């Protein structure tokens, strides 16, 4: 017995591959298990094309809830749903676009969301700040900010900071017919026996802020990257593709959408040691005419190795990707307008460009060390 | 010290020699100026590798001869040599062939014209050396061209055809010639060896064009794909296999002109079928005792003939339909098994029935499994096959059966 | 017997970081993890070899991730090969090029042939084919084994190269079994060096020591014949650490003595980098816990597990014939074996 108007609802979780794999899994499974409490049925699955997941590369998992098995069939044996009712992005930098593999292009975060659907984003920024980095809407939807920063972990050690519970609480706010808050709380209580976990669901529900978005709102500043796939008559026989040309970077897969952070460079303090250029697995540095190394932001995937191997303190600083609107290389800016560039560097990084000024160390991102005393959960790891 | 062969040995005249099917293939390797071959011991195919080694050691041909550490390596070695533009040769039998299965699958996927022989041998367990066709047949869906030889002469001729057809840019698919173990791999027969000049006219140089793996041609071969790409790639293979039919026809005509043999049809060898009411259908050396039986049965007044299949892949559907629709009954003799198949019939049986399914007027098609494990097909067995075929004529449903011939209970 | 090699001096040793060539033959836009050291190895590998190179890549991360869905990051010609086939791919490619050049069918010139494999495809499935290739002294090819210590592409399963006790999806840590994987890492480069005397060059390297690695690759290609290089590649996904620490973990693996850097050239063994400094007593090995505690795949380790790990690494350094390379010990009573007058063993022919 159901009082829902539709016969099924589809939720996707868009996340940073590997770092948030377990988180996405927990959210999707909980959606189905919570729905079960009121007699609905459902399925949860990862998008097979994302597998094997790669650190940072955007991936998706799905949960479909239906009033019965018959209605669920339309969502079975599928790689991914064409349309979702709700999309949950668990890292706000994902609103700058999703490029999951070659020929995929850069897709707006709201692309599969139906008209008047919901886009939930975990963020410490305001809705307007997040919207300013989201592609111009083609159809109306509601942006929902779930308070909290992006929660990153690894395959084996899960960071149990209740992000999943907050997301479920927020989901209950926008899909009350399908995901009842009381069912969510009961499920969490059952699974964890932890009142603080239950409280987090309530917190997500209470703290979620809704911002209706009209068609036309958002930014048109992101790159348009779309492809038409060839067919068998024009594809070269023998499974052959052209090699990359010398000096070229891969136009079919740019991958800058894998970034949560990007490096900014202090050219004044750079000692031209080559280490950032040498140790970058993605050859994202170009050598400048004066021997500095500048970041090619069209290619950088934000791993942070350059910042770690750079021998000069605060010469390379990793900064939240949401603080940047463009992907332009910056050395020319420094050459033409030295002081302007350094002000820009300071504003973005929060660190002084003057090496004489000591700045407190920036907040550490990522899963960091594996501390055995952090509560490892029954992290499933691996593939479904 | 590497023995350099500056010029290949030229013969001005065709010669005749007494040699086994394996040795005949070795001569084909010499005539075709193969560049790389990889060997690994397993009976009965490896007679070709032994014969080739002698030719190389005695300076009769210049081929990189690599003894691999296993069949998987063997087939991978020649696949990669082929990708850089080498004309290659390889082979195996039975479980050895199966050990190379992964390499066999990907070679077809890559559209690389590797030429191989499969010295048809029963699969383990139990181990047995006698001939069965299941080793070759196991790859029938993957995109390999699969011809079968009846004589040592035909073995050599099919090898030359294999490089010609496989390397043709319209096809570019690998070819595996089926040679019945012992009867064909080892038994010695009179074989006419063509002149080098004639072979050079028949076989153009191997040219991969813009698919050649070389620093002057920067390409990536076989990036990883997903469901958005694979079907198009499979389609290309399907198209190539369809083209193979016409390329074989063309090549067969050329072969006949140059060498004066090859039969009327590239695909079927018909024996006494003009007025036949009943025919046997099969491939490989089993045709020989069946021809003996046909002559004997004809003396008794029976109108019986044989259609021998020369190319199992591409399956010559139209030719088979045109040929077999003339008869009252067809006894398909499979030197293979396909446990659990429709009517528990062998592979050829079910393929022939499928080919003839949509005809308005169909012959009765009866299945026979014979000669497994190298068991000879003796005349009483042939008679038994004939009688069962004849008895089934006129009643389509009576073909819904597969008889195992010559089995002790 | 002389090996037909093509050493032409076109790949000189790189003097230092400023001497590293700028040309990129493995470019950005590959679907590897952030901080993937195996991708860095690929980049350095072809930087070292230059553009007259053909690369054969066996199935694994460096195949699937790099060419995911019909694309390529490779500037040099590249072809896929099967999981256990890198040895055969190297051999077949080298043999094909050699005979075509000899017969005058293609231009006779030096072309580097490099076939790479992961630890799954190389140390496990494909070890037989690699071994076979290393006996074929007449062909010039390099097999490069990039070791991220798991079958990484299939989402992290254990291989013979997975360290003792590490968590993988085939060796999770649970309430009944804390450690499901208790096999010690198989010594691949040492084993291959010991068993294939006709391979002129076998080495162990790491992208954290980039110039050392590139020079090893160049040496292998210059010496000619079949050669082998094994790199240890920290893997953020499988080892569970933040990608920014990939270089640091590579350094730690070497500085803790867990992954010795060395090369064997025509039977002569050299230790390189910090490994050499440790062997010469100029540097002390760091405790292995410094390395283990940084990675989530060891987060379940109890003290006794760390102790066992340390003990095995200690043995490698204190008991092996050549630390980190050749493991045999000689019993105390047999020490004369080490001091044999080898020339005196031969019986002279009497008239």
Image (tube, grey):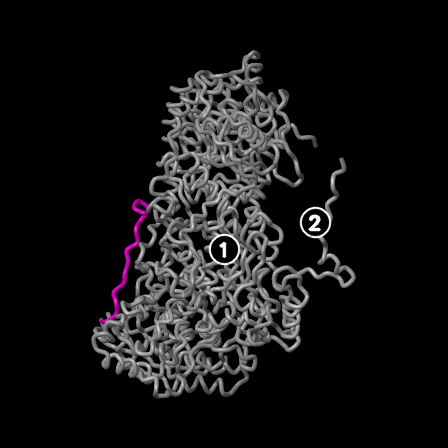
Total numbered labels placed on residues in the image: 2
Please name the residue shown 33% across and 50% down the image: A242
Of helix, strand and loop, which mostly describes the magenta segment? loop
The answer to whether residue A165 is above or below residue A82 is: below
Q: What element carries label 1?
A: strand
Is tag 1's residue or tag 2's residue first in the polypeptide sequence? 1
The quadrant of the image that shows the C terminus of chain B is: top right
Specify few, some or many for label 1: CA neighbours under 10 Å numbering under 14, 14-19, or 20 or more: many
The magenta stretch spans which residues?
A: A221-235
**Do tags 1 and 2 sit on the same chain?**
yes
| Residue nearest the viewer, comparing A347 with A354 | A354
Residue C255 % position (x, y): 55, 71
Depicted B185 relative to depicted A229: above or below: above
Subunit of mark 1? C
- The percent position of residue B215, horizontal first and vertical second, equals 37, 47
Nearer to us in this view, C338 or C321: C338
The label nearer to you, 1 versus 2, is 2
Give residue A34's position: percent from left, percent from top. Answer: 47, 76
- Residue C338 visible from this viewpoint: yes
The residue where tag 1 is placed is: C144
């Amino acid at each position: 017995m159901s009082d829902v108007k539709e016969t099924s609802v589809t939720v996707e979780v868009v996340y940073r591959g590997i770092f948030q794999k377990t988180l996405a899994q927990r959210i999707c499974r909980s959606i189905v298990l919570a729905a079960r409490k009121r007699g609905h049925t459902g399925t949860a699955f990862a998008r097979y094309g994302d597998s094997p997941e790669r650190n940072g590369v955007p991936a998706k998992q799905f949960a479909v809830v239906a009033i019965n098995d018959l209605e669920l069939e339309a969502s079975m044996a599928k790689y991914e749903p064409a349309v979702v009712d709700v999309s949950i992005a668990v890292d706000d930098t994902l609103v700058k676009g999703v490029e999951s593999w070659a020929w995929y292009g850069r897709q707006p975060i709201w692309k599969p969301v139906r008209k008047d659907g919901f886009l939930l984003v975990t963020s410490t920024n305001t809705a307007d700040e997040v919207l300013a980095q989201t592609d111009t809407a083609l159809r109306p939807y509601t942006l929902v900010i779930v308070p909290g920063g992006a929660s990153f972990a690894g395959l084996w050690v899960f960071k149990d900071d209740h992000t999943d519970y907050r997301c479920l609480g927020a989901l209950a706010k926008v899909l009350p017919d399908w995901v009842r808050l009381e069912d969510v709380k009961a499920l969490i209580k059952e699974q964890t026996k932890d009142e603080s976990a239950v409280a987090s669901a309530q917190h997500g529900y209470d703290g979620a802020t809704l911002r209706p978005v009209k068609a036309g709102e958002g930014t048109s500043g992101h790159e348009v990257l779309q492809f038409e796939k060839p067919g068998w008559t024009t594809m070269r026989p023998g499974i052959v593709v052209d090699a990359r040309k010398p000096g070229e970077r891969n136009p079919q897969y740019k991958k800058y959408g894998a970034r949560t952070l990007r490096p900014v460079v202090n050219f004044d303090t750079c000692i031209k040691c080559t280490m950032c250029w040498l140790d970058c697995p993605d050859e994202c540095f170009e050598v400048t005419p004066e021997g500095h190394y500048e970041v090619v932001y069209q290619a950088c995937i934000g791993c942070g190795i350059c910042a770690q191997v750079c021998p000069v303190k605060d010469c390379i600083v990793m900064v939240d990707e949401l603080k940047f609107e463009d992907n332009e290389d910056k050395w020319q800016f420094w050459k033409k307008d030295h002081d302007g560039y350094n002000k820009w560097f300071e504003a973005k990084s929060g660190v002084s460009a003057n090496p004489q000024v000591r700045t407190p160390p920036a907040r550490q991102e990522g899963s960091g060390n594996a501390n055995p005393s952090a509560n490892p959960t029954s992290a499933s790891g691996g593939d479904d | 010290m590497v023995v350099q062969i500056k010029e290949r040995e030229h013969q001005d005249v065709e010669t005749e020699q007494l040699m086994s099917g394996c040795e005949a293939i070795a001569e084909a390797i010499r005539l075709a100026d193969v560049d790389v071959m990889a060997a690994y011991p397993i009976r009965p195919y490896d007679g070709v590798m032994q014969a080739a080694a002698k030719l190389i050691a005695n300076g009769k041909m210049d081929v990189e001869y690599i003894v691999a550490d296993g069949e998987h390596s063997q087939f991978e070695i020649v696949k990669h040599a082929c990708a850089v533009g080498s004309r290659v040769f390889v082979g195996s039998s039975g479980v050895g062939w199966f050990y190379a299965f992964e390499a066999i699958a990907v070679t077809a996927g890559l559209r690389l014209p590797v030429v191989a022989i499969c010295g048809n041998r029963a699969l383990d367990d139990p181990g047995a050396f006698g001939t069965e066709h299941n080793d070759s047949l196991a790859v029938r869906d993957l995109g390999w061209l699969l011809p079968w030889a009846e004589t040592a002469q035909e073995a050599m001729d099919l090898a030359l055809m294999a490089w010609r057809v496989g390397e043709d840019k319209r096809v570019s698919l690998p070819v595996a010639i089926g040679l019945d173990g012992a009867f064909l791999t080892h038994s010695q027969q009179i074989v006419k060896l063509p002149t080098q000049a004639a072979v050079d006219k028949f076989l153009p140089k191997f040219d991969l064009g813009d698919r050649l793996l070389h620093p002057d041609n920067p390409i990536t071969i076989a990036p990883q794909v997903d469901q958005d790409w694979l079907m198009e790639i499979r389609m290309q293979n399907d198209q190539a296999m369809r083209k193979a039919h016409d390329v074989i026809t063309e090549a067969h005509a050329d072969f006949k002109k140059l060498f004066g043999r090859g039969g009327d049809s590239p695909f079927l060898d018909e024996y006494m079928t003009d007025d036949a009411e009943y025919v046997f259908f099969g491939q490989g050396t089993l045709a020989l005792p069946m021809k003996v039986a046909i002559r004997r049965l004809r003396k008794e007044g029976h109108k019986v003939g044989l259609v021998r299949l020369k190319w199992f892949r591409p399956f010559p559907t139209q030719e088979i339909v045109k040929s077999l629709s003339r008869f009252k009954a067809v006894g398909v003799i499979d030197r293979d098994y396909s446990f659990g198949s429709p009517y528990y019939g062998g592979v050829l049986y079910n393929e022939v029935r499928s080919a003839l399914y949509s005809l308005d007027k169909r012959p009765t098609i009866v299945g026979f499994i014979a000669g497994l494990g190298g068991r000879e097909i003796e005349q009483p067995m042939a008679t038994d096959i004939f009688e069962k075929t004849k008895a089934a004529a006129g009643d389509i449903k009576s073909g819904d059966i597969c008889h195992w011939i010559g089995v002790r209970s | 017997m002389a090996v037909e090699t093509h050493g032409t001096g076109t790949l000189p040793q790189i003097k230092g970081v400023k001497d590293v060539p700028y040309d990129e033959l493995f470019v950005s836009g590959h679907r590897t993890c952030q901080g993937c050291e195996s991708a860095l190895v690929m980049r350095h590998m072809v930087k070292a070899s230059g553009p007259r190179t053909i690369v054969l890549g066996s199935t694994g991360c460096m195949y699937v991730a790099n060419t995911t869905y019909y694309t390529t990051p490779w500037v040099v010609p590249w072809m896929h090969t099967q999981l256990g086939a890198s040895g055969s791919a190297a051999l077949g490619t080298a043999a094909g090029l050699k005979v075509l050049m000899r017969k005058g069918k293609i231009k006779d010139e030096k072309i580097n042939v490099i076939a790479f494999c992961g630890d799954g495809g190389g140390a496990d499935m494909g070890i037989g084919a690699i071994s076979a290739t290393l006996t074929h002294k007449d062909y010039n090819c390099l097999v490069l084994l990039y070791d991220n210590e798991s079958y990484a592409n299939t989402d992290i399963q254990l291989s013979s190269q997975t360290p003792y006790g590490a968590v993988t999806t085939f060796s999770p840590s649970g309430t009944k079994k804390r450690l499901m994987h208790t096999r010690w890492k198989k010594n691949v480069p040492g084993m291959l060096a010991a068993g294939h005397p006709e391979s002129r060059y076998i080495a162990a390297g790491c992208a954290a020591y980039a110039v050392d690695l590139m020079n090893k690759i160049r040496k292998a290609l210059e010496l000619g014949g079949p050669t082998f290089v094994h790199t240890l590649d920290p893997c953020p996904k499988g080892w569970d650490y933040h990608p920014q620490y990939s270089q640091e973990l590579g350094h730690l693996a070497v500085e803790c003595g867990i992954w010795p850097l060395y090369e064997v050239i025509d039977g002569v063994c050299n230790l390189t980098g910090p490994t050499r400094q440790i062997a010469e007593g100029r540097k002390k090995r760091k405790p292995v816990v410094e390395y283990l505690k940084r990675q989530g795949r060891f987060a379940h380790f109890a003290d006794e597990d760390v102790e066992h790990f340390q003990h095995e690494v200690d043995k490698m350094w204190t008991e092996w014939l050549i630390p980190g390379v050749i493991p045999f010990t000689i019993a105390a009573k047999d020490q004369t074996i080490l001091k044999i007058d080898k020339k005196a063993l031969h019986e002279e022919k009497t008239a």
